[in-house]
Image: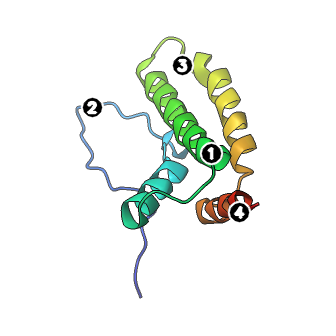
Amino acid sequence: MQMIYLFRLKWYNPDQHLRESLVNFTVMIYANFFSSVTKDNGQPNLNADQFRRMMNIVYIEGVINGIKRIKEKEKGQYFKYDVLIFKHDSVLTELTGNLKPHELLREMYRLSRN
């Protein structure tokens, strides 16, 4: 039986105060998927609209990741960034339709043919 780990293992540093929860794990699933597909197969054969959509998804995920990193460093106003994260999450949901990355890419290929 093979074990699959969903998160990277981190070494515990007792000198460093860690405020980590599952909410604060930032995994850029679409960006990582598109990156691996591009690395393995070259640039996807998408029309201009779908390529723009893919780049917007990667960009929005990067923005969310950056905001979450800034949020972790802010001590006094920890919740001030939640509205920004929510707005960008809703844009990401609108772009992806909450599809899994491989299903989204399949849809983007299908829409490129039409």
Q: What residue type is labelled 1?
A: Ala
**Mark 1 neighbour density, 10 Å: few (under 14) some (14–19) many (20 or more):** few
Helix, strand or loop for disc 1: helix
Measured in 3D between alpha carbons, the distance from the residue under mark 1 to the one under mark 4, in whole angstroms, is 11 Å
Helix, strand or loop for disc 4: helix
Marking on residue 105: none
**Proximity of marks 3 and 1: CB atoms separated by less than 8 Å:** no
Q: Earlier in the sequence, mark 1 or mark 2?
A: 2
Q: What residue type is labelled 3?
A: Tyr
Residue 10 location in percent, x, y?
Answer: 30, 50
Residue 22 location in percent, x, y?
Answer: 53, 46
**Mark 2 neighbour density, 10 Å: few (under 14) some (14–19) many (20 or more):** few
Q: Which of 89 and 73 is in front in this view?
A: 89
**In this picture, residue 57 sits left or right of residue 95:** left
Helix, strand or loop for disc 3: helix
**In this picture, residue 114 sits left or right of residue 18:** right
Quarter the C terminus occupies: bottom right
Camera-near label (3 vs 4) is: 4
Residue 35 location in percent, x, y?
Answer: 43, 54
Image quadrant where residue 17 sits? top left
Q: Which of marks 4 and 2 is nearer the N terminus?
A: 2
Q: Which of 36 and 98 is in front in this view?
A: 36
In the picture of the structure, the residue carrying the numbered disc 1 is 48
**In this picture, residue 18 sits left or right of residue 24:** left
Q: In this view, does 16 lie above or below 1?
A: above
Q: Earlier in the sequence, mark 3 or mark 1?
A: 1
Residue 39 location in percent, x, y?
Answer: 37, 60
In the picture of the structure, the residue carrying the numbered disc 3 is 78
In the picture of the structure, the residue carrying the numbered disc 2 is 16
In the picture of the structure, the residue carrying the numbered disc 4 is 113
